[in-house]
Amino acid sequence: MMFFVLSHKGPSAAVTSTVFVMTTSAAVPTGPEGAISDGTVTDRLVEANERYAAAFTDPGMDARPVLRVAVVACMDARLDLHDALGLALGDCHTIRNAGGVVTDDVIRSLTISQRKLGTRSVVLIHHTGCGLESLTEDFRTELELEVGQRPAWAVESFRDVAQDVRQSMQRVRTNPFLLHTDDVRGFVFDVQTGLLREILPG
């Protein structure tokens, strides 16, 4: 698991301006043999939640997204969707999986999102340097050899990220369960620049 932590470095003799550095969980102090000090990662998350809850105030929202949009994106830890898209708590539904591909379970979530919770727009986001670009369906065979059972799901790997975005858009636009398919747009997020590149339908 990767955490991004914003840390502040004060002025030094050589540098007088404020410097902000993005670090990962690898910078967290570790104990013997690299173990994370003071408990497991989950322990740290639970402790963080306790601090969060201590200052929490119920915002009084219901489950319907304010902007009536559902965002489907990759689970990659480098994607901070709310910051990248200027979204606030309660603005959208966020559906994430490996690759951000439109699978049956994504269709399930989108159908509930539209039919029961009022969303109308769909934004699909893949990204550069995705792990699915280095996988093939052979991964399922490897799992079968290891555990004796072949997964029922497809890996959904791809080589051309733009073409996979187009395929995902087409899956949404042609699905009979979805009520609103007129505002479906797809993008590739550049993990090095933070910019979205829109992919037009093929």
Image: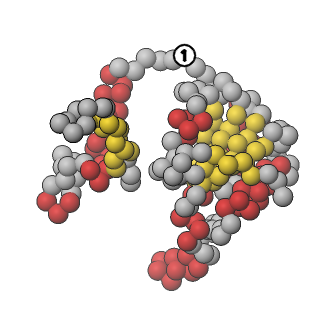
Please name the residue shown 17% across and 63% down the image: 33
Front one among 127 and 113: 127
Front one among 149 and 81: 81
What SS does tag 1 mark?
Answer: loop
Front one among 34 and 144: 34
**What amino acid is at disc 1?**
Gly
Please name the residue shown 34% across and 42% down the image: 21
Residue at the disc numbered 1: 60
Please name the residue shown 26% across and 50% down the image: 27
Q: Can I make out residue 182 in this image?
A: yes
Q: Is residue 112 left or right of residue 95?
A: right
Question: Where residue 82 sits in the image (x, y, percent)?
Answer: 55, 35
Q: Is residue 56 left or right of residue 35?
A: right
Outermost residue to the front: 14
Question: Where residue 167 sits in the image (x, y, percent)?
Answer: 77, 59
Question: Where residue 91 sits in the image (x, y, percent)?
Answer: 62, 28
- Residue 171 quadrant: bottom right
Q: Quadrant of the C terminus?
A: bottom right
Please name the residue shown 63% across and 36% down the image: 93
Q: Quadrant of the N terminus?
A: bottom left
- Residue 34 quadrant: bottom left
Q: Can I make out residue 108 in this image?
A: no
